[in-house]
Image (tube, helix red, strand yellow):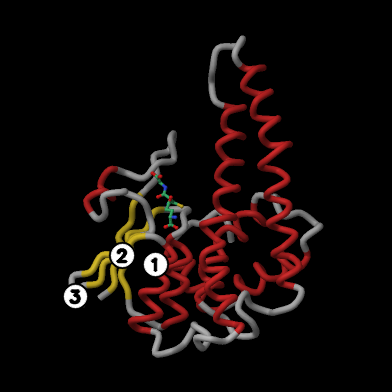
Amino acid sequence: MITVHHLNNSRSQRILWALEELNIPYEIKRYERDSVTQLAPASLKEVHPLGKSPVITDSNGDITVAESGAIIEYLIGTYGQGNFIPAIGSEEHRQYVYWMHFSEGTLMQQLLLKIIFDKVKTDPMPFFIKPIAKGISDKVMSDYVGPNIKNNLDYIESHLSESTWFAGESISGADFQMSFPLEACVAGDVAGSNYPNIKAYVKRVHARAEYQSALTSGGPYDYA
Ligand SMILES: N[C@@H](CCC(=O)N[C@@H](CS)C(=O)NCC(=O)O)C(=O)O
């Protein structure tokens, strides 16, 4: 049995979606973010030393897998029966590998920088520091993070004008992996009206019965 160590409002929602699509039975162990810091509870470190979510355990072999992309690859490789991954050597497979890595390796990095620099402006601090912190944050956002996010979203928008799913016309693990940053961008209005293909894609994901089942089992989620 697969156990998903599920943190509320987190990347583990996409693992629940993957499990529903793959039709793999699973159970959920729930963890709640600290209401002030938004960090995961220390108990997650008992499952994996980094204490992040998602992490899964598979009782069939006493296996623990952390890191969304590795979990998705594990589930598809172990239980997918050849589904949700394009044939190796095909252009679709190259796209699959690319977007599987791009999600955390490129896009999430920039989105996290945005969260951090937005937080720098709003966190409590002595009044005389505030203008300096705001100045630094605005500069980093306007010169580096903002243009990078736009560049990434423009690229994704163009890719999605050419195919229904990230690796062609069939849904794949790359879609599970890309779903989280894109639904966060749409919910947080980072991807505004300039990105109709991204918005339509997220709608397409959310409309799937398997996605809805994952939402029901995962509990409250801010990005759907
Ligand atoms: N690249 C990792 C990121 C894992 C990660 O940072 N997860 C967040 C939730 S979205 C987390 O556990 N945050 C709580 C914390 O940092 O304490 C993955 O995709 O699995």
Question: How far apart, in angstroms, are the residues tagged by discs 1 and 3?
Answer: 17 Å
Q: Kindly identify the amino acid type of the residue bearing the numbered disc 2.
A: Val
Disc 3 is placed on an element classified as loop
Drawn side of residue 75 relative to residue 211, left or right: left
- Whether pointer 2 and pointer 3 mark residues with C-beta atoms closer than 8 Å, the reply is no
Q: Kindly identify the amino acid type of the residue bearing the numbered disc 1.
A: Ala
Looking at the picture, does residue 107 appear above or below residue 26? above
Mark positioned earlier in the residue sequence (1 or 3): 3
Cβ at disc 1 under 8 Å from ligand 1: yes
Looking at the picture, does residue 195 appear above or below residue 175? above
Mark positioned earlier in the residue sequence (2 or 1): 2
- Whether pointer 2 and pointer 1 mark residues with C-beta atoms closer than 8 Å, the reply is yes
The residue singled out by tag 3 in the image is 61
Q: Position of residue 222 (x, y in %)?
A: 55, 53
Q: Position of residue 196 (x, y in %)?
A: 78, 65
Query: Mark 1, residues whose alpha carbon is within 10 Å: few (<14), some, or many (≥20)?
Result: few
The residue singled out by tag 2 in the image is 65
Q: In the rendered picture of this protein, how many numbered marks are placed on residues?
A: 3
Q: Which mark is residue 70?
A: 1
Q: Quadrant of the C terminus?
A: bottom right
The residue shown at (59%, 75%) is: 95
